[in-house]
Amino acid sequence: MRIDTTAELKRKFDITLSREQSIALITHKKPDGDGLAACLAFQELLLKHYKRPADIVLEEPPPAVYEFLNAADRCITFSSDMHYDIVVQMDCHEPSRVGTCEPLLQHANSVFAIDHHHEKEIQPESITFIDIEAASTGEILYRMFSSEIIRLPRPAALYIANALYTTILNDTDNFVNSNTKGSTFAICEALCQLGLNPAYITRSFIMGKTPTELKFTGQVFETIEIHCNGQIMFVHSTLKMLEYMGLNQSATSKLTRLLKGAKGVKVLVYFQQGDASSFRLSLRSDTVDVNKLARRFGGGGHTQASGCTISGSLSLVKQTMLNALMELLGDG
Ligand SMILES: [Mn+2]
């Protein structure tokens, strides 16, 4: 069931909380700075305001970059014997996006989804709130609970401010995406009132790459290919490239941030090899609806930033995407 206001969402959540016991917070596969930090903020709020512990359940331990939010100590890894009364899905609303954690949704008495991606598959039995205007899922959480957060003891409020700011940095790409609005800055200002030090979070989350990761970034830049008179830009990375540098997939995260906005380029596609037989595509554009494009390949996301996975060799996957893009840009 889709509901339309955060007030209604909160009301339903409060009722459910009074009726049920155990709570799990989950997010999509390959958790990002929005989904994961929104879970961390919500976990802290549930514990300090509602006095209710909640487990953050992930497919695997969180990436090391989230250590500034003590993520490793605050998350547990999914196992098939886990059952929770309430499951809250953050930054996604379709069961297929939660990966191996999906059984948690099936076994829960109540499921909530809080998201800002375009509607894909609303589950009739889950209470789903989607606001595609929100810059991040964390922003929705802030709107729901701002008065509760302000009243929390300072360390808890600061922790939540840090986590919510991370969600905003992540999804606005450090305030360069078009989802950055006055209301986003207003929330950031409110978070500063709670003690947030923006530069500290930026250093911990956006910067802080190791020299080896920067070298890998340089190698990805080396793969730049342009098509259609410079309107399409492709870059890629392979498992071999990562292996050679002794890195894992987390080195590929946020890399499109450095490549977006190239002059004359309408669509940027980053092909990241995920396993021996498939590529995960990150699509970015200011003018083309890449959500629609990603959906054609079973993916989705936002109008200007989306993703999908395509099986095949790198050359085949690139050709498939190039054909689809040429058709879309009217050159095919
Ligand atoms: Mn998000």
Image (tube, rainbow, N blue to C red):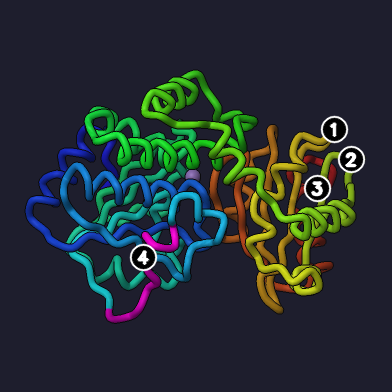
- Looking at the rendered structure, the secondary structure element under dot 2 is loop
CA gap, disc 4 and disc 1: 42 Å
Identity, as a three-letter code, of the amino acid under mark 1: Gly
**296 up-or-down from 329: above or below:** below
Q: Which residue in the protein does label 3 denote?
A: 326
Identity, as a three-letter code, of the amino acid under mark 2: Gly
- Residue under the image location 74 percent in, 39 percent down: 260
- In the shown orientation, is residue 328 left or right of residue 142? right
CA gap, disc 2 and disc 1: 6 Å
Q: Say if mark 2 contacts mark 1, CB within 8 Å.
A: yes
- Residue under the image location 70 percent in, 39 percent down: 285
**Which of the marked residues, 4 or 1, is nearer the chain's N terminus?**
4
For disc 2, the neighbor class at 10 Å (few under 14, some 14 to 19, many from 20) is some
Residue 209, given in percent of the width and then of the height, sits at 69, 52
Residue 139 in which image quadrant: top left
**Range drawn in magenta:** 71-81
Q: Which residue in the protein does label 4 denote?
A: 57
Q: Nearer the viewer, residue 301 or 219?
A: 219
